[in-house]
Image: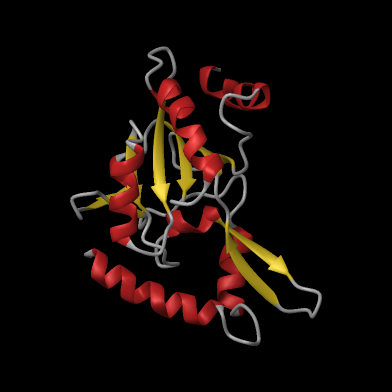
């Protein structure tokens, strides 16, 4: 699937999420299912800067931190050097995977080059058809009883070698709490 197909799907998703009556119930349930213990689907995928599609299956099998980011997110950008340092630490059996959740592939390419992230960096496709996009979403229940969806960035998610979410809300990289949360990797 190339990024043009993904962008088309994204437009469909965006329009279904912005209906006046709120979020579609099927989408709502998908988002609510994603929590600690959730097994990421084998259908999950990422897009490389060269526009190739990469299966999540090809990177799972080790501990992974998914680093969800967007171009305008200052805390995301500030965390890149910390996460790069962690990714270069040989004693940790951990892979850091940056997933850009901006709405356009061209924006992803532009800002990937600008920020020079320094570890695996992919475009997430901004579509609900990609299960890897779901952990970056949060359902908001509005006062009028309607639901809306927002993308959380920065968002750090710890995945075990089987592809299961261990911690959907890791603390800020480099913080004492973050280091406590990832100690599970060396057990």
Q: Which residue is drawn at the image coordinates 64% and 72% (left, top)? A: 148
Coloring applied to the structure = secondary structure
Residue 146 percent coordinates (x, y) = 72, 79
- In the displayed structure, does residue 135 sit left or right of residue 59? right
Residue farthest bottom in this picture: 20
Instruction: Please tell me in which quadrant of the rendered image residue 181 appears.
Output: top right
Viewer-closest of 53 and 36? 53
Q: Is residue 46 visible?
A: no
**Residue 149 image position (x, y, % from top left):** 60, 68
| Closer to the camera in the image, 70 or 57 | 70
Of the pair 33 and 125, the residue shown nearer to us: 125
User: Measured along the vertical axis of the image, is residue 31 above or below residue 56?
Assistant: below
Residue 44 in the image: state x and y as whole percent: 37, 55
Looking at the image, the residue that sits furthest to the top is 91
Image side of residue 119 versus residue 138, left or right: left
Count of numbered circles on the image: 0
Residue 19 in sight:
yes
Can you say which quadrant of the picture contains the C terminus? top right
- Pinpoint residue 78: horizontal percent, then vertical percent: 51, 34
The residue drawn where x is 36% and y is 61% is: 125
**Relative height, residue 96 to residue 144 (above, below):** above
Assign the N terminus to one quadrant of the image.
Answer: bottom left
Q: Is residue 10 above or below residue 32?
A: below
In the image: residue 165, left or right of residue 50: right
Q: What residue lies at 53% left-to-right and 54% top-to-bottom?
A: 136
Residue at position x 48%, y 47% from top?
68
């Amino acid at each position: 699937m190339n990024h043009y197909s993904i962008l088309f799907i994204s437009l469909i998703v965006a329009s279904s999420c912005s209906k006046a009556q709120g979020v579609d119930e099927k989408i709502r349930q998908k988002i609510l299912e994603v929590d600690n213990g959730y097994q990421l689907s084998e259908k999950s995928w990422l897009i490389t800067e060269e526009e190739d599609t990469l299966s999540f299956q090809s990177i799972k099998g080790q501990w992974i931190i998914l680093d969800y980011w967007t171009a305008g997110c200052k805390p995301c950008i500030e965390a890149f050097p910390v996460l790069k340092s962690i990714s270069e630490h040989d004693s940790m059996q951990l892979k850091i995977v940056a997933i850009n959740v901006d709405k356009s592939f061209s924006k992803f390419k532009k800002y990937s080059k600008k920020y020079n992230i320094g570890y695996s960096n992919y475009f997430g496709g901004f579509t609900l058809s990609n299960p890897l996009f779901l952990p970056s979403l949060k359902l908001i229940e509005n006062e009028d009883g309607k639901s809306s969806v927002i993308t959380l960035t920065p968002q750090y998610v710890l995945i075990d070698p089987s592809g299961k979410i261990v911690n959907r809300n890791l603390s800020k990289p480099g913080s004492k709490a973050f280091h406590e949360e990832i100690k599970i990797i060396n057990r």
